[in-house]
Amino acid sequence: MRKFLITTDGNSDLTEAYGREHQIRLIPLYYNMDGRIYGGDDVLPPEDFYNMMRAGKMPTTMAVNPEVVEKTFRSVLEDGYDILHIAFSSALSGSYNVAAMVGQQLEEAFPQAKIFVIDSLCASLGQGLLIHKANGMREKGASIEETAAWVEEHKGHICHQFTVDSLFHLFRGGRVSRTAAVLGTLVQVKPVLHVDDEGRLVAVGKVRGRKKSLNALVDKMAETIGSYRDENDIVFISHGDCLEDARYVADLVKERFGIEKFYIDMVNPTIGAHSGPGTVALFYLGDKR
């Protein structure tokens, strides 16, 4: 049986260090900030990225580059591994379609190899959590077929609950109306959103005040975790340069569910360009999204 590696795109919010430790190949994504292209080897520290946004700079994201995907896939195949690629939600990006196209093309050049490309219907560290679970199976000796089947079966059980500090960036991305963004800012309304079963970003509520919005994430977890309560040995949390708020949510989860282990990291720029500074997102396994 040939060994396999998991590949994914940068929207999984898994770090390069995590990728190196767990043999996960991360495909870089690119964005424009203040007239300069970042991504790959040219990295803008996330703290600088969010500070530039706070100062009024408006980043724009770029479509995934098929040549970069092909280079990554080809490198894995030439090293003698099969590929399980877990892509960012197709409802939010074209990353999955590009990876699927490249995978089909390379199957002709590497007929002995297996290439599975899965639409995760997930985002940020929700995608990262799915990959973390799948890679745990790989490390324990599961086959690529077994792991791919598990991912397909469980991807709809990766719950995403998140809130943002400002509605402005969601308005820029067409997620809320201008009126809602202006009124929300005036009265300190904070939206609570999730990623639905089709991988789309959907508002599920709104509360007044930052602390209530953070509490609401954990309330949503209580509503949706169901029979998966004991399956969550680790919970993932991402944030838009607001680590203390992320830790506050982690403390609430620990208090309410007894979960001790957390993976906390920043929302990467290609998602943060749309969600903005102050985003906090909570990811876990649950009965329903």
Image: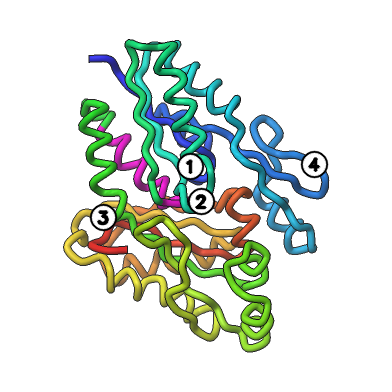
Which residue has dot 3 on it? 232
Q: Give the range drawn in magenta.
A: 122-137
Mark sitting earlier along the chain (1/3): 1
Q: Residue 95 carries which label?
A: none
Mark 2 residue type: Asp
Tell me if mark 3 has few (under 14), some (14-19) or many (20+) residues whose alpha carbon lies within 10 angstroms of its own: some
Relative image position of residue 198 (x, y in whole percent): 38, 57
- Disc nearest the viewer among 1 and 4: 4
Which residue has dot 2 on it? 265
Which residue has dot 4 on it? 36
Mark 1 residue type: Leu
Mark 4 residue type: Arg
- Disc nearest the viewer among 4 and 2: 4
SS at mark 4 in the image: strand
CA separation in Å, label 1 and label 4: 23 Å
Residue toward you, 20 or 284: 284
